[in-house]
Image (tube, rainbow, N blue to C red):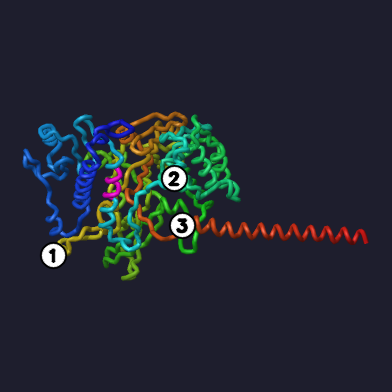
Amino acid sequence: MSGRPQGCPHLADLDGEEEKETMLKRYKTVISWHMVRRNEAVQPAKRRKIMSPTCGPCQLTLSRPFVCLQCLYTACWRGSHIQEHLQDSGHSFCADSKSGSIFCTECDDFVYDSAFASVHSSTSTSAFERFVPIHKNRQEPFKPWIPDSKDTQALEGADPVPCQGEGLLNLGQTCFLNAILQSFIANPLLRNFFLSDKHNEKLCPGKDCMSCEMDKLFTEVYSGKSGPIGPISFLATTWKSSSAELSGYAQQDAHEFFMSALNQIHQTSKGKTAASCICIVHSTFDGTLQSDVRCERCGNVNSTPEPMFDISLEVNSKGSAAGQDVTLESCLRKYTQPEKLGTMYTCSKCSKASNASKRLSIRKLPPVLSFQFKRFEHPTSDKSTARKIETRVRFPASINMADFTTHGMKPHGPASKANGNHELPYRGPESMYEYDLFSVVCHEGQIDNGHYTCYTRHQDEWYRYDDEKVTHSTLGACLASQAYMCFYVKRYLHYKPWSTPSYVKTREAEAVKEKEREREKARARKREVDTEVDDALLAVI
């Protein structure tokens, strides 16, 4: 990808606005075609209406065509036929229908242009919304943000902040804390929440508040100051508010700290209601598992929902049975496959004790998926027998979770097809279930003398954090690392329109209470003054 910060100069030097507008319309058509072909449904008859183009020279049907933006000619990239067309016709630009990337013959590279990037974002999001049957009447259409005069003035006076963030000082075997904090900083939902001042540590009356520590952390990271940050108060608050196991300077488990930190942030966040919790932790990580217990005697299935903040996956130290590499998908398949219960099960339908099997599936996907690979084995209660599983787990840069959801696991056999039901085994288009990798926590070394590091993605760049050391990295290096925890964010987030955010309502209520407290203090001061005057008069008399 071209590294020009100002975009491609040849796109900027097009002859007139009319030519560029024509190319933008053609580019929008290309992106819309791909989104429709990808998400469109469900009826095979409808799929046949979406024709796939062919490559001009080799006449092959193209599932990922490259399209000339100056004449809409389609050809393949692998055979260099699209490059040959651009050279023969004198045209300069073509687009990849899948990724939206634009190739410029003058630059001989894939290039960037802000206008085309904006069209790609709005077109792909609008196309996605057309194919989402869930919450159709409650979802607000996508509107790109356009800065007004006040926003422009504020941005002109703002200092640019490096996108890679800063390193965190090791305060004595606190690499576990630093790695998790870097994943928090890279989490787009947590970042937007705390940078939007939805929890202000200067206005919070609480003591030893973990949400205040998160607010201070984001303030320091985005303050523009250079140099590593020492999370001293964060560590002290962790010691005071968490269990005794996380206190002290001994080596700790990063996943244990992760769960403890989420619990402490939840307890100090606002947003709890009688029905459910809408705090930032639940809004970001909360999902639901479904446990299905099937009676082998009568076939009755008893389903029970279970809360989920992360998914802990078994890692087979001997590899898979077929000798293949261990992958995230294979771990998920093992996690969701049925297993027989070790004890007799009393069925609620037949009321008899019988064998039963249990199967887990994901009933509700959270906005951010957290996976932990169980690399530390403890065969006995004796800590000396603990060992680390060094098996490499391959994980992708993006993952589709549709096959691991409750709806995706429902049987859709020949009987449903015979009845004319050609629907997919899950609700909505596949894009609703797609997640992108944004952070990986790695453990290097052995169980008793290991070290935690972290990879995070900022926009399209990857960085490796080793305590205070921050180095530019690549996606390939991240995918080749020995992952202990992986964090994925949902590609498309649902949101409700026309509703006042809870933090706005909370602030308004607090403002009313604060004014009432000030009036009460004023009345109390007036009563004190009146009392003093009365006492003075009585003394004179």
- 463 or 342: which is nearer to us? 463
Local secondary structure at mark 1? helix
* Residue type marked 2: Asp
Point out the frontmost of discs 1 and 3: 3
- 477 or 151: which is nearer to us? 151
Q: Does residue 400 appear anywhere in the picture?
A: yes
Q: Does residue 333 appear anywhere in the picture?
A: no
Range of residues picked out in magenta: 117-124
The percent coordinates of residue 411 (x first, y second) are 22, 60
- The image shows residue 275, relative to residue 242, as above or below, that is below
Do callouts 1 and 3 mark residues in contact (Cβ within 8 Å)? Answer: no
Q: What residue is shown with label 2?
A: 151
Q: What residue is shown with label 3?
A: 501
The percent coordinates of residue 446 (x first, y second) are 41, 32
The percent coordinates of residue 118 (x first, y second) are 30, 44
* Crowdedness near tag 2: few (<14), some (14–19) or many (≥20) residues, C-alpha within 10 Å: few
Q: Residue at x 16, y 60 (%)?
A: 43
Q: What residue is shown with label 1?
A: 418
